[in-house]
């Protein structure tokens, strides 16, 4: 075993107090996903989209990692000879706060804006308004939250593609398997010979593609698995 890819979704952050996207009534902080997460919504009403992320940013910045995030870090620390990459759909920074390494945010980050004119990325801790000027190119009104909206390309896809075609073990945690391309990663990893595990509260949309499905709260199920994996690999080496 050399390469592990861990795909995370909003379910891993649920026990840190962050709402999952499709929980309950289908609203995210009282907004329909299509009103705040699409290119069309941003073109139609950038002020509304900015105000949504301005509301979400401090909530995400205050959240703390839970036992599932910490267990990923422990895996990386205790198995230093393995390449363990984290591919996250989450825009929160809980993997960073848990001090994990090799984190790829394919749907962007809450603490960044990007200028649609020059591509400059700006660290964003305070509110951003729709008429702000880009500090790099000085053009006004072109800053967009660095969140991948529906209708945009996910980020880091060439690195992810390489990882999936070289991985021995693929683990998905807290994701419903609805949104592509992430929902297709398990198929790609399996095609290249990886063993595939799912840790989710409920069966997900593509459950049948996983060799093992472990249902329950990730903060309980995943640390247990991580301890077993560390013991097993250390016994073999
Ligand atoms: P979803 O809300 O679609 O799915 C969250 C999954 O987490 C569900 O299948 C739950 O069963 C599971 N879950 C909830 N609590 C859990 C817990 N404590 N432990 C383990 N699992 C738990 O969220 P995502 O799959 O992340 O895209 O959604 C994927 C993408 O759709 C998001 O990245 C976002 C969204 O639209 C963008 O923002 C571009």
Image (cartoon, rainbow, N blue to C red):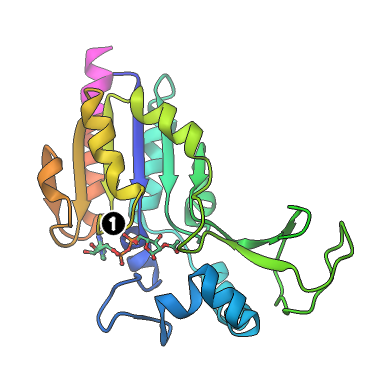
* Viewer-closest of 148 and 104: 148
* Viewer-closest of 161 and 43: 43
Quadrant in the rendering for residue 82? top left
Residue 33 horizontal side relative to residue 26, left or right: right
Quarter of the N terminus within the rendering: top left
Quadrant in the rendering for residue 150? bottom left
Q: Position of residue 100 (x, y in %)?
A: 49, 42
Q: Position of residue 153 (x, y in %)?
A: 50, 51
Does label 1 point to a residue whose CB lies under 8 Å from ligand 1? yes
Q: Where is residue 173 in the image (x, y as percent from the top left)?
A: 28, 50
Residue positioned 36% across, 62% down in the render: 10
Quadrant in the rendering for residue 66? bottom left
Where is 70 relative to 188, above or below? below
Q: Would you say residue 236 sits in the magenta stretch?
A: yes
Residue 230 visible somewhere in the drawing: no
The residue that disc 1 covers is 175
**Secondary structure of the residue carrying numbered label 1:** loop
* Viewer-closest of 55 and 65: 55
């Amino acid at each position: 075993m050399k390469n592990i890819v861990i795909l995370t979704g909003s379910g891993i952050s649920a026990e840190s107090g962050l709402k999952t996207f499709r929980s309950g009534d289908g609203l995210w902080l009282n907004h329909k996903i299509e009103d705040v997460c699409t290119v069309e919504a941003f073109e139609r009403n950038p002020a509304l989209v900015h105000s949504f992320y301005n509301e979400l940013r401090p909530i995400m910045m205050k959240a703390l990692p839970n036992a599932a995030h910490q267990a990923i870090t422990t895996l990386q620390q205790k198995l230093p000879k393995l390449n363990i990459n984290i591919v996250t759909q989450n825009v929160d920074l809980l993997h960073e706060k848990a001090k994990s390494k090799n984190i790829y945010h394919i749907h962007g980050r809450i603490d960044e804006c990007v200028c649609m004119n020059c591509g400059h990325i700006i660290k964003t801790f305070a509110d951003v308004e729709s008429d702000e000027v880009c500090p790099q190119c000085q053009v006004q009104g072109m800053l967009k939250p660095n969140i991948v909206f529906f209708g945009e390309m996910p980020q880091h896809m060439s690195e992810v593609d390489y990882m999936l075609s070289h991985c021995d073990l693929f683990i998905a945690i807290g994701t419903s398997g609805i949104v592509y391309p992430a929902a297709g990663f398990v198929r790609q990893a399996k095609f290249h010979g990886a063993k595939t595990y799912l840790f989710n509260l409920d069966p997900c949309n593509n459950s049948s593609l996983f060799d093992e499905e472990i249902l329950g709260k990730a903060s309980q199920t995943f640390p247990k698995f991580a301890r077993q994996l560390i013991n097993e690999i250390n016994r073999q080496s």
